[in-house]
Amino acid sequence: MASSTPARTTRSSTAPDSDRPTRIESHGIDHIPEEERYGHPRELFSIWAAANVNYLSLVIGGALVLMGLSLAQALVVIVIGNLFWLLTGVLAISGPAAGAPSEVITRAMYGVRGNRVNNAVTGWMISVCYFALNLAAAAGAAFALVEKAGIAASTPVKIGVVLAIAGLTLTIGVYGHGLIVRLYLPITIALTAAFGVVAYAVLLKADFGYVPDAPLGGTELWATVIGGVTLIAAGPLSYTTSADFSRYLPSTTSAKAVIGWTALGGFVPSVVVCALGALAATVVDMTDPQTALQALLPGWFAPVFLLALVVGTIAINAMTAYSAGLALQAVGLRIRRSRSVLVDGTVAVALTLYALLVSNFLDTVSNVLQLTVVLLGPAMTVYAVDILLRRNRYDGAALMDENPGSRFWFARGFNLAGAVAVLGGGAVAALCVDTAYTGPIAAALGGVDLALPVGMVLSGVLYALLMRGRVSA
């Protein structure tokens, strides 16, 4: 297990701390040697906070009330759903231990070849889809901002806005870890200030005793509560790559500190912003959150609010692009990390422009992503169980060896334990789904969606049993 001694700050002779943001990160999925490790785990808080003070959290918080929950019920769901950030924190401790990103560490679970499939699906494809959806959301806020400036949002203007937002996002992703660490603290402070004004306006008018005219009860209430928890949990569960942002920390870094700062960075802003969305939904119609929230805000603040929505989305998408670039390398594509990030961005921009200007297929993509919990829940659980089985002892150099017969080659490049655990857990979870479609188990339970707990528990148990006696820490 990683040492519990206090973290030490280590500076590289080739990349001093002060120079980190001024140069493009040279490392991709390769192992980070100890002499190039630097930083303190508290930096992880601002990284995750900047990505979670965002518009999406407001929308989800408001959606819980629209689903029929009372304010009190919605707040309980928000807290429970965001507790899954603890798992994101647990996965992050493998970064300093291995000196490698999650996209490489998962070779221990799936084998060298099996991990390429894992990265193609749960890494690259899902990340690019999220990038496109978030970019479309940011573009919507930016279009409104442009119109407030007296400029008509014509097709050329829309294209220019999308390209500008994507350009800023990809610049951060290309420069990489150093710029993210340095930039996300001021972004967190700025977004906190902006959302503080939103909070003040919402709290003045919110109905703290809100209960819907027709309160839910029985099976319908449980189905809505569990569905709400799954909706909230989808956020932290989508970050199976949290080691990407902790791998530069020294190997002596406290595992508890990494878990704590990562989990708090995701949990605190997500709970606060989701709660603001729920509170706003007690007095305005959150089916159109952007317009509804502006009705609660001072007129002078509306442009600032729209700008904050754009900045928050850029922050979350830069992290998505960064990890997607690493996933593309881990799939087996021989390309520099900076170029792989640009490839991801190009695909996401193309999807966004097609959706905004030709055919709005992002609704279909969104429905598909609702089902990702079927795979992401089991994938995150298998990762966490592997960390426990190995006591977080990962040999970074061995993980980099892709040759047949290497330590993590397993059988023909595949670790069947990982594949069976994820696919088995995912298959049963799919029977319990009640989102884009209703599985037979969910139908038999009256619409109660147990996909998340069933998939995670089953995959974790399967992996632990199948790897029993095969893991040497």
Image: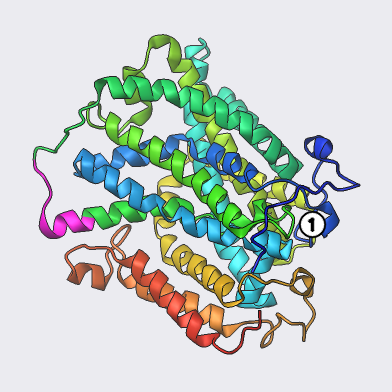
Vertical arrangement, residue 310 with respect to residue 252, above or below: above
Vertical arrangement, residue 278 with respect to residue 449, above or below: above
- Amino acid at circle 1: Ile
Q: Position of residue 340 (x, y in %)?
A: 73, 52
Q: Position of residue 391 (x, y in %)?
A: 61, 73
Vertical arrangement, residue 407 with respect to residue 377, above or below: below
Residue 99: within the magenta? Answer: no
User: Which quadrant holds the N terminus?
Assistant: bottom right
Vertical arrangement, residue 366 with respect to residue 313, above or below: below
Residue at x-position 56% and y-position 41%? 316
Residue position marked by numbered label 1 in the rendering: 335
Residue at x-position 28% and y-position 47%? 76
Between 399 and 357, the residue placed more toward the observer is: 399
Residue at x-position 32% and y-position 54%? 229
Residue at x-position 60% and y-position 75%? 109
Q: Position of residue 45 (x, y in %)?
A: 57, 42
Q: Secondary structure at mark 1?
A: loop
Residue 217: within the magenta? Answer: yes
Between 1 and 78, the residue placed more toward the observer is: 1
Seen as rendered, the residue at the extreme front is: 5
Residue 225 seen by the camera: yes
Question: In the shown orientation, is residue 316 left or right of residue 296?
Answer: right
Question: In the shown orientation, is residue 388 left or right of residue 34?
Answer: left
Q: How is the image coloured?
A: rainbow
Residue 144 seen by the camera: no
Q: Position of residue 390 (x, y in %)?
A: 61, 76
Q: The magenta stretch spans which residues? A: 214-223
Between 19 and 40, the residue placed more toward the observer is: 40
